[in-house]
Amino acid sequence: MARNRQELIRKVEGASPAGDFDSFRIGDTVDVHLAVKEGDKDRIQVFSGLVIARSGSGNSESFTVRRVVGDEGVERIFPVKSPSIKAVKLARAGKVRRAKLFYIRGRAGRRARIAERRGEIPADASAPAETPENNAPQQEQS
């Protein structure tokens, strides 16, 4: 019986409703694009903030995003495999040395800042791609 239960769990987890968003880590600032249904209309709502925690695994994995709105901290917990999450875009990569950033709750202003992780460019950053034609020296025409 236990073997059949494990096989059933693997089968259900394999047919997950949404994709994985492993491109962000703790300390990163992300934009979570949510599908919101209002009456008969659908729209995308963006929740931007700092990822302060990730917990769970498999279908029960979730992450917590915190932002400050009008001197009040707002936190939301999002399931990673939720069908209502359309995209999670990395806005800024943070450099942290902890798995949970709950200490940020007690800080404000400059003390609540997270250093930026250098060397990693967010996926949505618009930088011109380097091609061999752009790097070739220009020849003078006379």
Image (cartoon, rainbow, N blue to C red):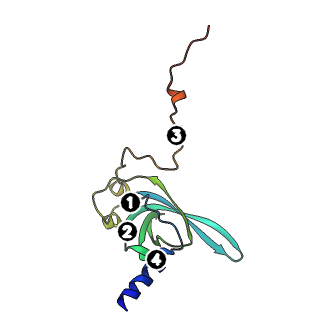
Q: Residue under circle 3?
A: 127
Q: Residue under circle 2?
A: 54
Mark 1 and mark 3: Cα distance apart in space: 22 Å
Given this view, does label 1 or label 4 mark the residue nearer the observer?
Answer: 4
- The answer to whether residue 71 is seen in the rendering is no
| Outermost top residue | 142
Element under label 3? loop
Quarter residue 46 falls in: bottom right
| Outermost bottom residue | 1
90 and 8: which one is in front? 8
User: Disc 3, disc 2: CB below 8 Å?
Assistant: no
Mark 2 and mark 1: Cα distance apart in space: 8 Å
What residue is drawn where x is 43% and y is 65%? Answer: 66
Q: Amino acid at mark 2?
A: Arg
Q: Residue under circle 1?
A: 25
Quarter residue 50 falls in: bottom left
Q: Earlier in the sequence, mark 1 or mark 3?
A: 1
Mark 2 and mark 4: Cα distance apart in space: 18 Å
What residue is drawn where x is 47% and y is 63%? Answer: 21
Q: Is residue 35 above or below residue 142?
A: below
What residue is drawn where x is 38% and y is 73%? Answer: 57
Mark 3 and mark 4: Cα distance apart in space: 37 Å
